[in-house]
Amino acid sequence: MAQGTDLYSILYSYARRNGSPRIGVEDFIGFLRKYALRVCEDRPEWAKWAEDTGPRVWRDLNQLQEDGKVLVMGEEDGQQLFLCFYYAEQIKAAYKNPDNDADMPFPDEVFLDITIPGEQIKPLDVSTDLDAFLKEPQKTILPIIKLVFPDNRGEALALAPMIPVKILEVSLIKVRNYLLKHGNREFVQHKLAPQLAGKEEYLRELMDKIIIHPSDCIKDMGEGREVAFYFWAYFCSLVRHDLNSKNELLAEEQGTLQAVYLIEVCSGFFKAQAVRAREIELAFRNFELALEKPPYYFSRAAIAKFKDNKGVLLLGRYTQDGLDAYIKKRITEPPSAAELPELLYFRTDDAVWLVKKSRLMALCARLFVETRPVVIKAISRRWKKLLLNFGREPAMEEDREFENLILHYVEKYAPVLAALLKDHRLYLVHEEIRGGDKGFPEASRLFNRNELLPLRVLLLVKRKELLSDVRLLLPFWYTVPIISNIIAFFQNLGKKKRKRARDEDGESERSQIDGLKKELRDSAREAESRLVPAGYSLDTYLYELSQRWGKLLNKQSKDNLVEDVNSLVRDGLRHLLRFQKEVNRDTIDRMTGTIMDNSTGLHKINEQNYLFLYVKLYLVKLLTGKAVF
């Protein structure tokens, strides 16, 4: 009976005794109860099956069904069990001691005296299908693999987990058996010597390894070494030609020929796999080199376009999943607990950027050089405009305000630099490099006493010098206090007059709106109740319409576009109100159409239907006094 007392071991042993994976449940329960009663005195571990045998069996069967080991089927003569892995267990046992069967072919159904149901078997042609199977191996034990050898050289049963390692071990044992008989070793060594000229020592060593430790050859084969691949290619070709030349083969010769077919396919697969691995390794080496080149920081889109020195995309050498896994490992696994990972990432509003730790300081230096003229130009333009209007601001006088102004323009024009300067890892990398063997020059330091140096220092921007340079660009009279004060006086006087005029115009327009006829206001209110859907207010519906025609990703740009449209509507309404004489239900529609026709800027906006409805409702909002002109 079974060595173990668990239900599955007992079921398998019972099935082997009966020669079938099908077991009648009631017959089995009766047998188990009798057997347990008979042996429990000498073997106490069987006592648990002597009492409540039926309920205990069914309880354990439920778990075996969940594990997929047993199927319970209803039959006319009672319920039956089917052991799913019955044949698989026999195949596994057949490979347990390959030395005992070294002079026999690989096990097949005839050898094992079994007939496997068609749904439990998957045939693979060794010459055409096995390589594809090795590339995408089967993850489950079932179905059982049937290896079909070319040239009608038989079949072999194997389990998916046995391929390729176990079948290679068995194949090498059969090859060893072949070499040890009939002087085959000397024959093979003599024939292969010219093919491996200059590698005679390796040839002898490998032949010894096959004889003494055949399983060790799998490691050389798996590494895809060039000389090992050529040896097995020549060896398999030689043995195939020698054995196929015979009219009839002995059992051991049939087994050797089957082993040679398997070794040839597996060796080629390992060689291709090794070549592929070296290509991927080289591609990632080129990836690392690309990260060290300017601009030193890269988005996901830029990384996908990395090329080798021949102009070939690296993404074709490694897969996207492989690249993601490699980057994840490099950004999460530091060389030691005291160091940061070799790759770092940081975010801006529009992207995630990758930078190599060793190039972070070079990146900062590059960004400082690129950002300095941009910031100087922006501040110069700002101050020139202020000074031309005889204005001033605190940033011209105070370093703190000047620093805030620089930061504003850095965030606006150099978001990558702004993100780096805010990242606490910059300080850690700075100190890690400074404390290293090479360090870096004192002038290149970014921090002083754990604090980031001021931006005006890092960008080499001096407030007084910049202000002086801006003043040099002004007309000469701006540098003469008396003349500039007189001009400023008259300009301010003109500004006051223009302001007064604008105020008077505004009062006139407001009085005109306030004096609108009652029917125009009523018409606007009637249009509002008709156009705004239930559940919406006028403002919420206007906002939804603006989202439909204002399809810009940047929020600030979208807000600016909406405000430009609103301004065009307000200006158009002011003009129309001067000539409005008659009011009816179509007045607001006509106003909307006129504004749309006269404003060429509105023609460039897509979704004209939504825009027309938006303009009409915004007119309603203005006419009902819910918005200010």
Image (spheres, rainbow, N blue to C red):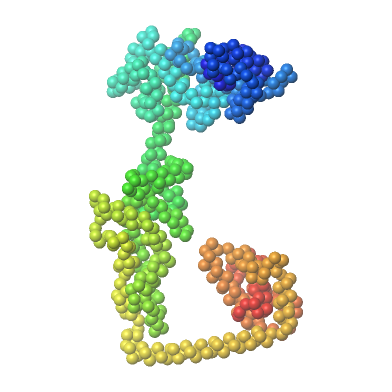
Q: Residue at x 48, y 10 (%)?
A: 251
In the visual, does 317 lie left or right of 142?
A: left
- The spot of residue 289 in percent (x, y) is 35, 47
Residues 369 and 107: in front is 107
> What residue is shown at x 45% (from left), y 15% (from top)?
98
Residue furthest to the right in view is 584
Judging depth in this view, the residue of 176 and 186 nearest the camera is: 176
Depth check: give the residue in front, 110 or 595: 110
Query: Which residue corresponds to the image point at 72% horizontal and 66% vertical from the top-left?
Result: 534
Q: Which residue is situated farthest in the front direction here?
A: 41
Q: Nearer the viewer, residue 348 or 588?
A: 348
> Which residue is drawn at the image coordinates 34% and 46% (left, top)?
337
Q: In this view of the protein, can residue 302 be seen by the observer?
A: yes
Quadrant, the C terminus = bottom right
Residue 132 on image: x %, y %: 51, 29
Whether residue 311 appears in this view of the structure is no
Up the image or down, 391 lies above or below 207; here it is below
Q: Quadrant of the N terminus?
A: top right
Residue 286, horizontal then vertical, whole percent = 37, 44
Image quarter for residue 241?
Answer: top left
Residue 152 versus residue 521 in the image, above or below? above
x then y, percent, for residue 543: 62, 67
Picture quadrant where residue 70 is located:
top right
Is 430 on the left-hand or right-hand side of 11? left
How many dots with numbers? 0
The image quarter in which residue 558 lies: bottom right
